[in-house]
Amino acid sequence: MQNFGMSMLWFWVCYILVTIVGMLHTIFNIYVRKMKPMDKDGMGEGYEKTKPWHPLYNIILFSIFGFLYMRGLADITINEALITGAIWVGICIVFDLFGWVIIKHPWSLSFKEFYVKYQPWITLIYIAIFLGPVIGYLFCLI
């Protein structure tokens, strides 16, 4: 990896932004669209209706931030994009385990809820994160 520090800066800014967009979408659904919020039985309709949108947030935002990272490199290569995508998705998988499953908070989920019931969305999200730098690379070629 040519510039690990910049890669991590773009990754974490994007990760936080994607999380904020998802939360705002849920809040919008609850307060504007009057969907049910989370309760003792689950995350609620307001969150559940956002799930199909999660891969879209990720592919758009991680592609933009992948582009921002790639365009700052001295030598822009597909190999660099693939390595960056692999590192980003690897960090995301580990961080998600801690941030959304192991560490308990109001929006945390069980292992089964996050990795089984959140299918196919979580898999599509991880594919989108991996492809973000690759799509960013392709935009650098234009």
Image (spheres, rainbow, N blue to C red):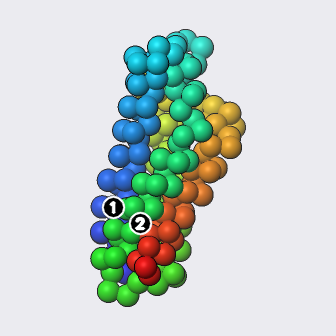
Q: For residue 22, which numbered disc appears in the image?
A: none
Q: Mark 2 = which residue?
A: 66
At label 1, the amino acid type is: Trp
Q: Nearer the viewer, residue 116 or 136?
A: 136
As displayed, is residue 69 above or below residue 124? below
Q: Image quarter for residue 26?
A: top left
User: Quick one: label 2, few (<14), some, or many (20+) residues within 10 Å?
Assistant: many
**Residue at left offset 36%, top offset 38%:** 20
Q: Position of 111 compared to 103: left or right?
A: right
- In percent of width and height, residue 101 lies at 53, 35
Q: Secondary structure at mark 2?
A: helix
Q: Nearer the viewer, residue 18 or 25?
A: 25
Q: Nearer the viewer, residue 119 or 24?
A: 24
**Residue at left offset 60%, top offset 14%:** 41
Q: Mark 1 = which residue?
A: 10
Image quarter of the C terminus:
bottom left
Q: Earlier in the sequence, mark 2 or mark 1?
A: 1
> Mark 1 and mark 2 in contact (Cβ < 8 Å)?
yes
- In percent of width and height, residue 52 lies at 59, 38
In the current view of this chain or complex, which residue is farthest to the bottom? 75
